[in-house]
Image (cartoon, rainbow, N blue to C red):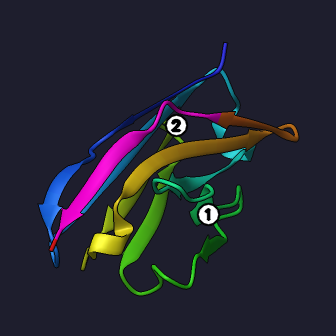
Amino acid sequence: QVQLVESGGGLVQAGGSLRLSCVASGIIFSISAVGWYRQAPGKQRELVAVTGNIGSTTYADSVKGRFTISRDNAKGTVHLQMNGLKPEDTAVYYCNANFRKRDYWGQGTQVTVSS
């Protein structure tokens, strides 16, 4: 049974920081691509950042230079450090793992940035 459990969301003022964490179980984490997506009210879910199993990273243009994704294969965790948060970053953030060509999702964690 695959489980992705997120933590670290919350309410923060513009310019502030948050760190999201996701713990994965039930997959071989070291060979999985893992990342973060977000969905704002009335909008489609979009990629925020992803890291491949060899350490490559991809970021949405809107978060480049502000967000950093990192992974710990030994612990099966992926983190998203978010700095310089803006009101437009407000969304539900979802952890994603792609393992053996299947996508798995966490339950989501709310991030709210006040102006």
Locate residue 13: give its quadrant. bottom left
Residue 19, position as x, y percentages in the image: 28, 56
Q: Residue at the far top: name it.
A: 1
Q: Residue at x 58, y 77 (%)?
A: 60
Q: Residue at the far front: name it.
A: 42
Amino acid at circle 2: Gly
Q: Which residue is mark 2?
A: 76
Main secondary structure type of the part rendered in magenta? strand
Locate residue 90: give its quadrant. bottom left
Viewer-side label of 1, 2: 1
Q: Secondary structure at mark 2?
A: loop
Residue 10 included in the magenta stretch of the image: no
The label number, if any, that marks residue 36 in the structure image? none
Read off the magenta span: 105-114
Residue 27, position as x, y percentages in the image: 69, 27
Q: Which residue is mark 1?
A: 47
Amino acid at circle 1: Leu
Residue 101, position as x, y percentages in the image: 88, 41
Q: Earlier in the sequence, mark 1 or mark 2?
A: 1
112 horizontally vs 5: left or right: left
100 horizontally vs 63: left or right: right
Quarter placement of the C terminus: bottom left
Quarter placement of the N terminus: top right
Locate residue 80: give its quadrant. bottom left
Residue 65, position as x, y percentages in the image: 41, 87
66 horizontally vs 71: left or right: left
Count of numbered labels shown in the rendering: 2
Query: How would you rate the neighbour count of disc 1 (Cα within 10 Å): few for under 14, some for 14-19, many for 20 or more?
Result: some
Q: Residue at x 16, y 75 (%)?
A: 14
Q: Residue at x 67, y 71 (%)?
A: 56
Q: Secondary structure at mark 1?
A: strand
Query: How would you rate the neighbour count of disc 2 (Cα within 10 Å): few for under 14, some for 14-19, many for 20 or more?
Result: some
